[in-house]
Amino acid sequence: MLNTGDILETIHMIQDENLDIRTITMGISLLDCADADITRSCAKVHAKICRLAEHLVRVGDDIGREYGIPIINKRVAVTPIAMLAAASGGDPVLYARALERAALDVGVNFIGGYSALVQKGFAAGDEALIRSIPEALAVTDHVCASVNIGSTKAGINMDAVGLMGQIVRACAERTADNNCIGAAKLVVFCNAPEDNPFMAGAFHGAGEPDCVVNVGVSGPGVVAAALQKIPQANLTEIADTIKKTAFKITRIGQLVAYQAAERLGVPFGIVDLSLAPTPAVGDSVAYILEEMGLEQCGAHGTTAALALLNDAVKKGGVMASSHVGGLSGAFIPVSEDAGMIAAARSGALSIEKLEAMTAVCSVGLDMVVIPGDTPAAVISAILADEAAIGMINSKTTAIRLIPAIGKGVGEELSFGGLLGAGPVMPLNDRSPEKFIQRGGRIPAPIHSLKN
């Protein structure tokens, strides 16, 4: 039976506290689009995406209007394109152009899956695709790329780490006239999930169905508002409040996911219950941490507060959905979170503190702007550090670093929209180049032997 109080509370969360469904993402397998002729393969890719995702945007808009729930993004994630490139050979950028045409034709915000999984080494097609990423992201607007460089089971592929430092720099350089946006569309993973609906790291894993609908919810503003109502609560009570709030948020995501799957005629996959912030004032994970009692995000105690938040979100959300997946927890993208932006600008939040926070949250160093003259080896070393955190802790870590070409510490890079803006953060200037040049593979930790 419907409860009037629950309905009014939901309306209040949507209107006043920035509650939204961040994305409906359709995952599409392209394995049947492989062909020895790359032109034929690209044609199959375009045709399949357009056939399956033809009504995705309309359905998302219809659900949003009918239920009064803002659905911000409609996206597509596809099989890692390196798998198709292995069969066809040729220039992988042709696939990026085919994905771009498909994204434009079906009207989605982004399309992810220009990806390679190289945690244990390079298979056919992997290295060619990785080296093509800077051009692919420069000549497209909607295509997103990702590379998985490590896992708890495989260890860390340091040859891939060394290469990705160069690729991140090249992506920024190729799009320097557009706020280095190429680097913002590239995610480097350890333990990449196969069902993540959030860009830029979404791809459709080989173990997924032919087509599936995944939904990503949001609502840090709702959690912050809930904590404002209990200013004298202890941390046990705060955790309980976050769990209850995450349950309510996730139930809305479950409703949207079921409706979208039914109307599109494809299976429901998962709800990713991550708290995904925006640059809008009030819609911030940092503000939640500050509501717990920190003067500003980045103060000592921030990692503990984030650990509490992340765990409570998972506990509350998992009870509200039949299938939870993706990343699920709390995102801390610096340029996309108003509180994180303010903390980074004031100097309260350093990259070292961010690294510590990534050990207890859902992602890694996300949307961090670094000096434009940062050497590739330093970028690689940051990737290695984050991959090590993910590998040892059996969790996903995802890294989006944006070298601000031509800018230094204290200056800012502005992307607009959900990507926001971020100050250039200082880095340790000691060189890790010899370490990175050694290559090879960092072995998997002993706790990977769980069979």
Image (cartoon, helix red, strand yellow):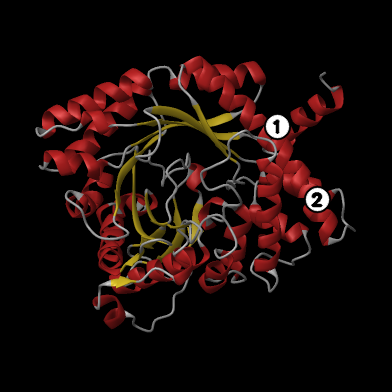
**Amino acid type, callout 2:** Asp
Q: Which residue is mark 2?
A: 240
Visible residue check, residue 424: no
Give percent across and percent down for residue 25: 46, 32
Which residue is located at x 45 percent, y 47 percent?
Answer: 193
Q: Is residue 179 above or below residue 75?
A: below
Label 1 sits on a secondary structure element that is: helix
Q: Horizontal and vertical percent for residue 234? A: 86, 61
Q: What is the number of callouts on the image?
A: 2
Residue 446: where, in percent of width, then height? 45, 71
Q: What's the mark number on residue 14?
A: 1
Disc 1 versus disc 2: distance between alpha carbons? 22 Å
Q: Quadrant of residue 189?
A: bottom left
Quadrant location of the C terminus in the rendered image: bottom left
Q: Of circles 1 and 2, which is in front?
A: 2
Query: Which residue extends farthest front?
Result: 451
Residue drawn where x is 83% and y is 58% of the image: 236
